[in-house]
Image (tube, helix red, strand yellow):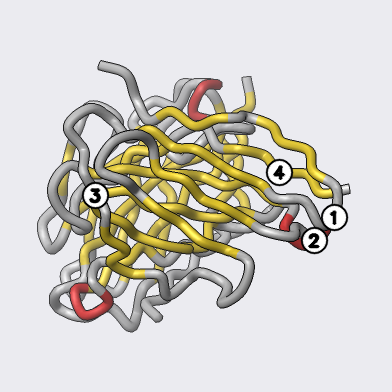
Amino acid sequence: NAGVMQNPRHLVRRRGQEARLRCSPMKGHSHVYWYRQLPEEGLKFMVYLQKENIIDESGMPKERFSAEFPKEGPSILRIQQVVRGDSAAYFCASSHTSRGETQYFGPGTRLLVL
Amino acid sequence: DAKTTQPNSMESNEEEPVHLPCNHSTISGTDYIHWYRQLPSQGPEYVIHGLTSNVNNRMASLAIAEDRKSSTLILHRATLRDAAVYYCILSRMDSNYQLIWGAGTKLIIKP
């Protein structure tokens, strides 16, 4: 059973470009979470989605960031007009049926903004 | 936010038990205690979780104090592959079980 998959693993963008990060949850999981991690820090929650619905986006910056989890295909975290401060590791996790369950994490996407 | 306090780092010898402490003095009755670990350059990995009673699984044991204000993750026989950052996290029912991550404890295993 494949785990959570994220791609790309590394992404380099220049300031002002768009970054698209993809996450395929574990098979059978319908809950997806996105986190951001800066070096030497813990993870910061960004958004929690179920299929076609955003359940909790309390950790998302108000501008430039958006997330979706369509009926078909992976979840996408989109960052428009990237700035240097967006450079971080972005992790996706999934769980089976509810938020209180164990979350299984992907390997992350490391975004570098030049 | 449900806050936990952990030492920044700990060292242990290979093949010896490791006790990783966590204080969570503001815990409420419905908060779960979770432990995850993160190996270098990898995503976090679930270790164990509990509510009130001590818990055991193939990876570790979780000892929860009677007043629930602290807990200890026990690795019974540490190996070099256990070197990681260990995060103690509370998930709070009234925050919809959101995981609030601290800085964790960096565990160094000496051969």
- Mark 2 Cα-neighbour bin, 10 Å: few <14, some 14–19, many ≥20: some
Letter of the chain that mark 3 sits on in the rendering:
A
In terms of secondary structure, where does tag 2 sit?
A: loop
The residue that label 4 is drawn on is A111
* Mark 1–mark 2 CB contact (< 8 Å): yes
**Mark 3 and mark 1 in contact (Cβ < 8 Å)?**
no
Task: Classify the position of the C terminus of chain B by image quarter.
Answer: top right
Chain name for mark 2: A
What secondary structure is found at the residue carrying circle 3?
loop
The residues tagged by marks 1 and 2 sit, at their Cα atoms, a distance apart of 5 Å
- Residue lying furthest top in this view? A1
User: Which of the two labelled residues, at mark 2 and mark 3, occupies the earlier sequence position?
Assistant: 3
Q: Position of residue A114 (x, y in %)?
A: 89, 48
Q: Chain of mark 4?
A: A
Q: Are marks 1 and 3 on the same chain?
A: yes
* Residue type marked 4: Leu
Say the numbered circle drawn on residue A83: 2
Viewer-nearest of labels 1 and 4? 1
